[in-house]
Amino acid sequence: MAIQRLLSLFFLLISSLPLLAQSRSDTNHVYSPCADAKVQKSDGFSFGIAFSSRTSFFLNSSVQLSPCDKRLSLSSANSQLAVFRPRVDEISLLTINTTNFFPDSYGGYMVAFAGRKYAARSLPAFVANNTFTVTSFTLVLEFKKGRLENLYWKRDGCSSCSGNSNFVCLNDQDCAIRTNNCKNRGGNVDCSLGIQLTFSGTDKHESVFNSWFEVKNLRQYSLYGLYSNLRSSLTDQYNKFF
């Protein structure tokens, strides 16, 4: 099982989408998350995660649009953007450092997205407010013949924090900690976001993506334990802190 840890991350205005570096084995020359691409295994694939309020992702409070859609006017709203370029069909752990970035200051929700004509976007996922912060997510990118069709957040029903009094189960689906326990918010816990990324479906040659099935077989929804050098994982921090 190929596992890749991605550390390159930057925040920028939603209207500014610079090109990302090309891997030598990357045949996908589309670098903007607001452009359409067809990919094969081992290609790089650019997608974005926009942070804003839940309502800002909907037109007239009814129809959810992609953050690439100018009708949302996210560039003039209180929003931020993270852009990633993982390798297709590799399980990746994406990290977002929240030392100086507070998701609750930008509406507290996030939407993953890519494409324009074939625009795909996830449902808004709660990240943080003044009371609670969710730090661990699993995002599945679903393709059909190499074209991204869907992005969805996979929840574990709070099984990863069951029985741990330091965590709060929100809506029977997300493990959260109290925001005032986070660094720079009055506490000592690193509340950086960890997003486990996997792929499902088929590439442009109709080869089947396997990374999501590998995660399902692991019967877990966090990659933190698989990285020996991530000593500051959320669970470890809480065990030491309390």
Image (tube, rainbow, N blue to C red):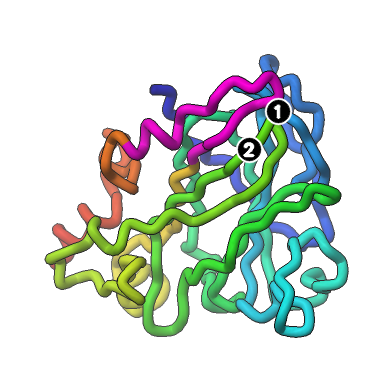
Quarter holding the C terminus? bottom left
Q: Is residue 155 visible?
A: yes
Relative vertical location of residue 93 with respect to residue 53 in this rendering, above or below: above
Residue most toward the top? 25
Relative vertical location of residue 49 with respect to residue 92 in this rendering, above or below: below
Q: Position of residue 121 (x, y in %)?
A: 67, 57
Q: Position of residue 208 (x, y in %)?
A: 55, 25
Picture residue at 62% right of the left edge, 78% below the top: 53
Locate residue 160 relative to residue 6 in the image: left or right.
left
Relative vertical location of residue 172 with respect to residue 239 in this rendering, above or below: below
Amino acid on which disc 1 is placed: Val
Picture residue at 34% right of the left edge, 39% below the top: 216
Under circle 1, the secondary element is loop
Residue 203 in the magenta stretch? The answer is: yes
Picture residue at 39% right of the left edge, 67% below the top: 134
Residue 102 in the magenta stretch? The answer is: no
Question: Would you identify the image quadrant in which residue 55 lies?
Answer: bottom right
Amino acid on which disc 2 is placed: Phe
Residue 143, numbered circle: 2
Per the model, the C-alpha gap separating discs 2 and 1 is: 9 Å
Residue annotated with mark 1: 39
Asked whether disc 2 touches disc 1, contact meaning CB atoms under 8 Å apart, the reply is yes
Q: Is residue 186 visible?
A: no
Residue 24, numbered circle: none
Q: Position of residue 170 (x, y in %)?
A: 34, 75
Q: Which residues are magenta?
A: 198-216
Count of all numbered marks drawn on residues in the image: 2
